[in-house]
Image (tube, rainbow, N blue to C red):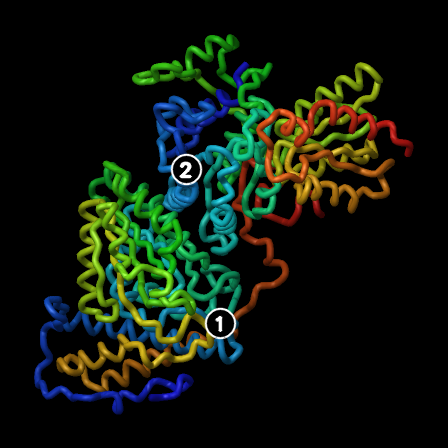
Amino acid sequence: MANMAQAVRMALHYGETHLGVTDVFGEDVGPPLGGVFTATQGLRTAWNTPLDERGIIGTAMGIAYAGGRPVCEIQFCDYAFNVLDMFKIAGNQRWASGGGYDMPLVVMTPNGAGIRGSLYHSHSFESWASRLPGWKVVMPSNALDAYGLMLAAIKDPNPVLVLLPKALLRARDTRLIPGEPADADELSRMIDAPVNDRAGWEPQWPDLGDHTVPIGSAALVREGTAGTVISYGRPLPVCAQAADELARDHGRTFDVIDLRSIFPYDWDTISKSVLKTGRVLIVNEDTEVTNFGEHLLRRVVDEHFYDLAVRPRTLMGKHVPGIGMNQNYEVNSVPQLGDVRTALWDLATEAA
Amino acid sequence: MPDANEDPPDIEDALVRRSTRIAPPAVLRSGREVMSVELALTVFRQMLRTRALEERSIKMSKSGEAYFWIGGPGEEALNVCLGLQVHKGQGPAHDYLHLHYRNAGVMLALGMPMIDHTRQLAMRWTDTHSRGRNFVGHYSVPAWNVVPVTSVIEVQFAMAPGTALVQKRHGQKHPAEAEGITVVIGGEAGTAEGDFETCLNWSTRPGLELPVLMLVTNNRFGISTDLDTVHTHRPVADRALPYGVRNETIDGNDPVATWNAINRAMRYCRRERKPFLLEAMVSRLHGHSSSSGAQRNWSDLDPLAAFEQKLIDAGAIDTATVRALKEDAKKEADAAVVQTMKEAEPTRDDVYAFTYAPSDVDAVYPKDYTGLPGVK
């Protein structure tokens, strides 16, 4: 019943106690706040850095070189643009050194729209990240997967970017993380710091267990025949809801694939579903020029052109410089439930 | 003055004075600084080897044996004095080196064979630093804590606090291994990047000061841009002042002064577990790289020739020995090149190798990268 922020926090605690995490750090990540989304509250190794993203990534690299196991945070992915070259370097260290150095670091950062974050707290980063060979990039759409992908990221000896959909950080999962108390209020009493007085507060961590979601494994969250929807992050539950509505109201069922890993991605799951339905829609909220979904679309066309019943399509964010503050900007910039529902209906009903 | 393409003048012509000493001195002096003759001769020999390798490297780039050259002729004094004082080894008990691409002398002084340099220059698969992927001088030696050199200017200054942080903690847990420091080097032009300030800032958090020796080699040029046109006239070392970091500007062409300055700075970092900023004024004898022709610049002081003269003047060495040492160094470099050119280049099958480390939690790449997911 944890929300995604609590799941990340518990994964980091598990990482500290079982997986050798030595440092959890970033801007406001340590006491007293524990992260602007409280995803790092109460962690033993959490510490605050200067407001310096380049220093955060550079220091994480240095810690990794020296045998530490760092997890660092970029407060919002919008602030990661000034570390693109550091990301590039972290991703190429093993390749550039001919296998001499691994780069076992984890960077987590809130991603995408949905909290009325305006221009500088609403970007999507996965398309940029997908162009960083050497990195693995994951994005959960629920708390249990957030826990599982965080553990995988920590265990993986390569640099892993964990993109956390901002709009889902407070969304509760119906499933329990191993060791998590069934009562959400009890969990909150154990691991949520009091808002007004965090001084002296100590979390009471549950006895957590391992739950690893392998990197590169998608989840088929709905099964159907009328089409395939590929998504991840914030739009994923929207896609599932739209599919449920169309199944209920019109008897049209869809394969809904939660990609979970942007790179490496689960091509086998995509390919099997496309062979089954012959109809494909890719949904994300990143801007449409140039978008990671376009890469998937290209492969679908390349490898399944003659298996397709109708043209494959994408539903993506508008190619605008940002998400405007007024809600009318946000809801008209990135895909909403109605947009997905319409796109799915069009996909399913277009004559072959 | 010789043409820029000519070899350096012969030693016999260059000598202005000859020593009349009978017994060699015990020490060399430079102002108030002192260096034993034994050490000076070790430094000199390493400087000669470094120069021989650099000059052979330039010839490789011009002859087609290699493609692109960049290096540090003119920085031999600094590089050798640094390399000989590094606590070499693997892990946080030893020094970490975040080098830039003009540090062949550091590596030779550490014990790197010349062929490890020429293999990279000739882009061979046998290049253990990068498998023929990176420019020359972009070393990577895990066994010596030499982290991969990156062409991007100054990013190494953002990474240095990370290794130093681990070293500081390691020393607190293991007092017998509490002298490992992080050495980070860049040129003066690179100090314009924010990463330089990052290093100063992150190394001086109150109560969390880090053992980082920041070395700035100031050759007065960033590619072709003169220092005076883009930087204040204040010394780079002054950038340490607002952070309360100890600092010094030295003549990096003078091995006696340089050795002692590095020694002081290293001892401070090792014992105080705090940072030090050392600015070394150095020469750039062959321009920025082969991209600017790598022609000899005779107007800059040659630290090797000057040190040779100083040793001869002091009676610490004679011209015959100098000549023999130079011959040995040239032969060593030539032999490295001959062997290198016999070795294999990478093939198309090697393109993906070493992209990802084997992973137990990756469903797609449990071993290594093989191209796009799902491609057979």
Chain letter for the residue marked with disc 1 in the picture: B
Left or right relative to B5: residue B74:
left
- Identify the residue at image location x=52%, y=39%: A160
- Of residue A319 and residue A178, the one placed in the foreground of this image is A319
Classify A87 as above or below A218. Answer: below
Residue that mark 1 sits on: B291
The picture quadrant where one finds residue A270 is top right
- Tell me the distance, in whole angstroms, between the alpha carbons under discs 1 and 2: 40 Å
Left or right relative to A57: residue A124:
right
Residue B117 visible? The answer is: no
Chain letter for the residue marked with disc 2 in the picture: A
Left or right relative to B117: residue A123:
right
Locate residue B120, reporting x and y percent. Answer: 47, 66
Q: Are marks 1 and 2 in contact (CB under 8 Å)?
A: no
Locate residue B317, reporting x and y percent. Answer: 18, 81
Crowdedness near tag 1: few (<14), some (14–19) or many (≥20) residues, C-alpha within 10 Å:
few
Residue A69 shows which numbered tag? 2
- Identify the residue at image location x=41%, y=17%: A205
Q: Amino acid at mark 1?
A: Ser
Classify A14 as above or below B100. Answer: above
Locate residue B255, reporting x and y percent. Answer: 22, 69
Crowdedness near tag 2: few (<14), some (14–19) or many (≥20) residues, C-alpha within 10 Å:
many
The picture quadrant where one finds residue A30 is top left
Classify B140 as above or below A270. Answer: below
Q: Amino acid at mark 2?
A: Arg
- Identify the residue at image location x=52%, y=31%: A110
